[in-house]
Amino acid sequence: MYGGENMELEQFSKIKDFYKNAESFLLKHEAAAELITSSCLAHLEVKTSSSNPPFLCCIREGGDILLTAFMNPPRPLLIFGKEKALPLLIKKLAVQDWGISKLTAPAKLARAFAEIWLRETGNSHRISMRMMLYRLERLTAFPPTQGRMRQASLKDSELAGKWLYEMGSETRSLLTEQEAMQTACQKIQEKRVYIWDSDQPVSMAAITRPTKNGMTVNMVYTPPEHRRKGFAKSCVAGLSRELLQSGRKFCTIYTDETNPSSNKIYRDIGYEEIGRYTELAFNQK
């Protein structure tokens, strides 16, 4: 335990112990905290190991969790909870000399973390992405679009890899063509990728990060020549419907805050904004 005023920080060395302690708090905020929850569940499911130890902690006040932090290097630090717990978290990170390269958190929490981190360590940051988080519990009806949704097969790997690379180029991702192809192949093998066909493949979407009651939709992409025809909307709606009919209570999706077109598409089919997230990249000294 590591205390500060009436708060206590408990650090864990194993993800299973962290999740056992944080589970009720994370499930109370299941959609908003899905990045941490799904990261824990993915690790527990495949029992992955890493040469780099994780940083895992819960900060409590009066027995109640105020904030959770999860980092499995080299992936970003994920935090969720109350701002007032940040000084204690950052003090712990600084004392143990944890290098933070990236952070993903609710926008207000990320901004507060960056300000305190700069004062504590002198490390500045830049905003690498501003995102909106949407949740869907019930689809809104809309006029049908020509075509149908199907699960991608291995014969779609080359096209899905090409689309994923193009998507990364548009969003300024550092994904190489080879990495895009490998990612697409892996996700297709895991039966996570879906294609909207209208005489030919015209749009795609994928599923990722399952939690107890939800699932996230991602990799939504339509090539420029097929845009503004409703294909992405139909693909995401069809995939979301399938998830809800399979027993999921909700779906989530992250969007680029600066892309009004995609945000409108998701609102049109029933997705509701539940928060704004920011990804920060820190300058290492």
Image (spheres, rainbow, N blue to C red):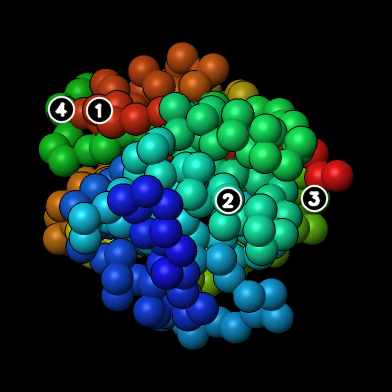
Residue 283 screen position, x and y as percent: 79, 39
First of labels 4, 1 by sequence position: 4
Check the image and name the residue furthest to the right: 285
Check the image and name the residue furthest to the front: 5
Residue 134 screen position, x and y as percent: 32, 33
Kind of residue at disc 1: Glu
Query: Mark 2, mark 4: which one is toward the viewer?
Result: 2
The label shown at residue 91 is: 2
Local crowd at mark 2 within 10 Å, few (<14), some, or many (≥20)? Answer: some
Residue 152 screen position, x and y as percent: 48, 59
- Name the element at disc 2: helix
Identify the residue position indicated by label 1 in the image: 272
Query: Mark 3, mark 1: which one is toward the viewer?
Result: 1
- Name the element at disc 4: loop
Identify the residue position indicated by label 3 in the image: 176
At x 31%, y 51%, the residue is 6
Q: CA distance from mark 3 to mark 4?
A: 38 Å
Give above or below for 263 relative to 86: above
Q: Are marks 1 and 2 in contact (CB under 8 Å)?
A: no
The label shown at residue 141 is: 4
Q: CA distance from mark 1 to mark 2?
A: 36 Å
- Name the element at disc 1: strand
First of labels 2, 4 by sequence position: 2
First of labels 3, 2 by sequence position: 2
Kind of residue at disc 3: Thr
At x 31%, y 56%, the residue is 60
Kind of residue at disc 2: Lys
Residue 122 lies in quadrant = top right
Residue 96 lies in quadrant = bottom right
Q: Left of 73 or right of it: where is 69?
A: left
